[in-house]
Amino acid sequence: RDRWFAMTRLDENRAKAQLAQKAKVDVTEVTNMTIWGNHSATQYPDFYNAKIDGRAANEVIGDEEWLKGTFIQRVQQRGAAIIKARGLSSAASAANAVVDTVRSLTTDTAESDWHSVALCSKGEYGIEADLISSFPVRVRSNKAEVVSGAPINEFSRGKIDASVNELKEEREMVKELLG
């Protein structure tokens, strides 16, 4: 279980790009972006813990309505929008996300940052143990660990719980296959 992971980096990259565009900064200025939960339309791109040039992203953006509405929806629906527009998936973006994920999992994470990856939960943030869910992660000495202590407000808790509930439903649907 310690060596298994699922990618949510494509979603993280999309979320960072949206925040950078809105703030009119380079995407490298966006850090601490977490995708919580499932790689689906319920995923939660956590703008409350994200930073832009070291400052709270929601303060830099200054538009809570946009963050809670347009931003979240764009990140959640980006893959579907690309397929609809092109008739194809965004294979190049996905390939780039693979490279980013491998780099992040094989290189120590800066103390001032983290990245998103789905791991087998050990009960962190109230997410049921053994459920595969996306978390904020740091790597130290080639070991990925869920970041502890990221603040979760009521809005974020609701979004995380909705995505985690979807993961539980999906697990139940395939339970017979898992033995």
Image: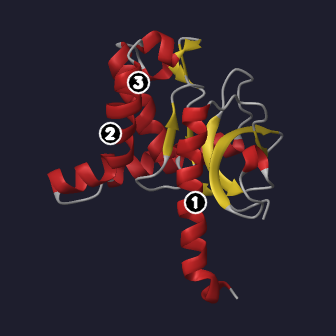
Q: Is residue 25 visible?
A: yes
CA distance separating discs 3 and 1: 27 Å
Q: Quadrant of residue 56?
A: top right
Q: Amino acid at mark 2?
A: Arg
- Could you tell whether 120 is left or right of 101 in the image? right
For image coordinates 74% across by 48% down, the residue present is: 126
Q: Residues within 10 Å of mark 1 (few under 14, many from 20)?
A: some
Task: Name the residue beneath numbered marker 1.
Answer: 165
Q: Amino acid at mark 3?
A: Leu
Q: Residues within 10 Å of mark 3 (few under 14, many from 20)?
A: many
From the top left corner, tell me how far across and down residue 70 is, in percent. Answer: 31, 32
Residue 25's place in the image compared with 160, above or below, is: above
Q: Amino acid at mark 1?
A: Asn
Query: What number is the disc on residue 74?
Result: 2
CA distance separating discs 1 and 2: 21 Å
For image coordinates 53% across by 52% down, the residue present is: 162
Q: Is residue 7 visible?
A: no
Task: Name the residue beneath numbered marker 3.
Answer: 19
Q: Earlier in the sequence, mark 3 or mark 1?
A: 3
- Image quadrant holding the N terminus, namely bottom right
Q: Secondary structure at mark 2?
A: helix
